[in-house]
Image (cartoon, rainbow, N blue to C red):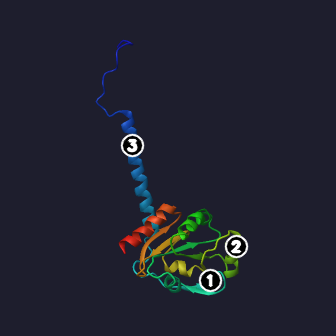
């Protein structure tokens, strides 16, 4: 073949198309893997009615899920489980703050000390979260959660509608909340 001759036309897909298909296939595999991991992490979360709990609040008063839900009638609520020693929880703080602007969020500090210790952490991090203290992790265990951060969306009927463990994006949290509102 001389230099001025074009190579024979290939019947194969152009390289840009192949790359796009390969990229989409890899993206689909990643999404499926992430969904599978999320399902595996939360398979132990109970279905149906959210387990009731009462605990000391970080401000020293008592509190409960029932009282928090009663303060937000007709709305789904988010229960966000975190710990002061959890670096991913620190990374998720901004997402929780953003979500709190539009939805009722009750936080539960798991294995982070007593009410005074949790209050100190909240002050240091400049967080005005309504927080119940779960010093031994019993509340967290009652929800079948194996780690933090974790988020549970409870519908206005008191049933668990969604749960996630690990870092969740703001969009992911908002979609879960939207789905709960939409699905009723």
**On residue 123, which mark appears?**
2
Q: What element carries label 1?
A: loop
**Residue 49: percent from left, percent from top:** 42, 82
- Tell me the residue at 53%/77% (across/down): 140
Q: Quadrant of residue 178?
A: bottom left
**Residue 162: percent from left, percent from top:** 43, 71
- 79 or 182, which lies in front? 182
- The answer to whether the residues at label 3 and label 1 have Cβ atoms under 8 Å apart is no
Q: What element carries label 3?
A: helix
Labels 3 and 1: the sequence-earlier one: 3
**Residue 115: percent from left, percent from top:** 67, 81
Residue that label 1 marks? 57
Residue that label 3 marks? 22
Q: How crowded is mark 1: few (under 14 residues within 10 Å), some or many (20 or more)?
A: many
Q: Is residue 129 above or below residue 24?
A: below
Labels 2 and 1: the sequence-earlier one: 1
- 77 or 110, which lies in front? 77
How many numbered circles does the render carry? 3
Q: What element carries label 2?
A: helix
Q: In this view, does 15 lie above or below 70?
A: above
Rounded to the nearest whole Å, what is the CA distance between mark 3 and mark 1?
Answer: 51 Å
| Mark whose residue sits in front, 3 or 1 | 1
């Amino acid at each position: 073949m001389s230099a001025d001759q074009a190579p024979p036309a290939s019947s194969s897909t152009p390289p840009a198309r192949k790359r796009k298909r390969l990229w989409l296939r890899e993206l689909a595999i990643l999404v499926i893997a992430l969904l599978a991991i999320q399902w595996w992490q939360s398979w132990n979360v109970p279905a149906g009615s959210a387990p009731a709990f009462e605990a000391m609040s970080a401000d020293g008063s008592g509190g409960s899920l029932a009282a928090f839900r009663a303060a937000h009638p007709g709305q789904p609520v988010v229960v966000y489980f975190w710990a002061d020693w959890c670096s991913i929880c620190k990374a998720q703080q901004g997402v929780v703050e953003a979500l709190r602007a539009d939805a009722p969020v009750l936080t539960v500090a798991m294995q982070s000390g007593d009410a005074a210790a949790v209050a100190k952490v909240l002050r240091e991090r400049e967080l005005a979260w309504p927080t119940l203290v779960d010093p031994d992790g019993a509340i967290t265990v009652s929800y079948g959660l194996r780690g933090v951060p974790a988020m549970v969306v409870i519908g206005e009927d008191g049933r668990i509608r969604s749960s996630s463990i690990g870092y969740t994006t703001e969009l992911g949290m908002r979609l879960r909340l939207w789905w709960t509102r939409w699905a009723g």
